[in-house]
Image (cartoon, rainbow, N blue to C red):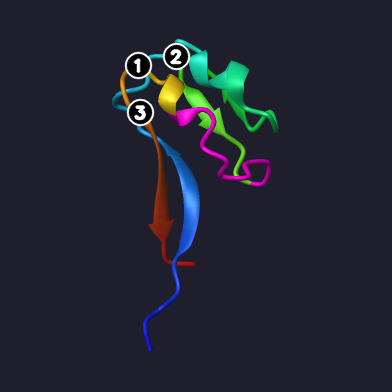
Amino acid sequence: MAEAKLPIFVVDEDLCYGCGACIALCPTNALELVDRLAIVEQQNCTLCEHCIPSCPVFALRIEDVKP
């Protein structure tokens, strides 16, 4: 039986430069800027993906990870 994976929201720290475009679009306020880097509060993120198209450098994504 395959091991289940859980989706999480990821900010690529190498790409994000802190423009803040994603923050304005987050309906649950799960994103904030800290030292010019978007940080996600996983417990507030509903994985709605509203913010993903706003990122000019494609630093936002949803990934499956092992629990």
Vertical placement of 24 versus 41: above or below? above
For image coordinates 45% across by 30% down, the residue present is 52
Q: Is residue 35 left or right of residue 61?
A: right
Q: Amino acid at mark 2?
A: Gly
Residues at discs 3 and 2 in contact (Cβ within 8 Å)? no
Farthest-out residue, top = 19
x, y percent for residue 10: 43, 40
Q: Residue at x 31, y 20 (%)?
A: 57
- Nearest to viewer (mark 3 / mark 2): 3
Any magenta on residue 67?
A: no
Look at 51% across and 13% down and name the residue there: 20
Q: CA distance from mark 2 to mark 1?
A: 11 Å
- Quadrant where the N terminus lies? bottom left
- Give the residue at mark 3: 59
Q: CA distance from mark 3 to mark 1?
A: 8 Å
Give the labeled residue for mark 2. Answer: 18
**Residue 41, image x, y percentages:** 62, 38
- Count neighbours of disc 1 (C-alpha within 10 A) and say few if under 14, some if 14 to 19, many if 20 or more: some
Whichever of labels 2 and 1 marks the residue nearer the N terminus, that label is 2
Are there few (<14), some (14-19), or many (20+) residues within 10 Å of tag 2? some
Residue at x-position 37% and y-position 21%: 16
Crowd class of label 3 (few under 14; some 14 to 19; many from 20; radius 10 Å)? some
Q: Nearer the viewer, residue 36 or 28?
A: 28
- Specify the amino acid type for callout 1: Pro
Q: Quadrant of residue 26?
A: top right
Residues drawn in magenta: 43-52
Tag in front: 2 or 1: 1
Of the numbered discs in the image, which one, if any, rests on residue 56? 1
Main SS type for the magenta part?
loop
Q: Earlier in the sequence, mark 3 or mark 2?
A: 2
Secondary element at image label 2: loop
Whether 47 is among the magenta residues is yes
